[in-house]
Image (cartoon, rainbow, N blue to C red):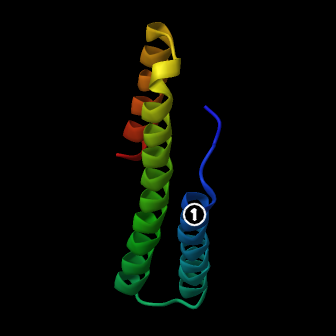
């Protein structure tokens, strides 16, 4: 499945990923600086949520595109695509 997303949707997902990247850099610095374990874990959880949200947004967009293009697909193609999307979704769950 190609990552065929509208510019707005792609921009939102990229913004989430960049935010997570910045948060992860902050977590690494916190560990290097010997910061409190609870603070590190709290920030690490925020990174994880940001990544999950970006992944879910990408999958949701893929589902939306697949549903709108579903009429053009053969029944076997739809089932294979559904299985692939389900596998992707469950990989984030």
**Is 89 above or below relative to 23?**
above
Residue 4, percent from left and from top: 63, 43
Left or right for 42, reference 58: left
Q: Quadrant of residue 3?
A: top right
Which residue is drawn at the image coordinates 37% and 38% (left, top)? 90
**Is 10 above or below relative to 40?**
above
Residue 52, percent from left and from top: 43, 58
At mark 1, the secondary structure is helix
Where's the N terminus, which quadrant? top right
Which residue is drawn at the image coordinates 48% and 47% (left, top)? 61
Decide: few, some or many residues near mark 1? Use Cα within 10 Å; few <14, some 14-19, many ≥20: few
Residue 43, percent from left and from top: 43, 79
Left or right for 74, reference 36: right
Pointer 1: what residue? 8
Number of numbered discs on residues: 1
Q: Quadrant of residue 85?
A: top left
Residue 2, percent from left and from top: 65, 36
Front residue of 14 and 52? 14
Which residue is drawn at the image coordinates 42% and 15% (left, top)? 79
């Amino acid at each position: 499945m190609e990552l065929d997303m509208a510019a707005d949707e792609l921009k939102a997902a990229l913004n989430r990923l960049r935010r997570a990247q910045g948060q992860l850099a902050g977590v690494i610095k916190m560990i290097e600086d010997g910061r409190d374990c609870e603070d590190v874990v709290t920030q690490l959880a925020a990174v994880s949520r940001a990544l999950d949200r970006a992944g879910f947004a990408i999958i949701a967009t893929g589902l939306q595109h697949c549903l709108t293009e579903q009429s053009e697909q053969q029944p076997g193609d739809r089932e294979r695509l559904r299985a692939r999307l389900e596998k992707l979704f469950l990989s984030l769950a």
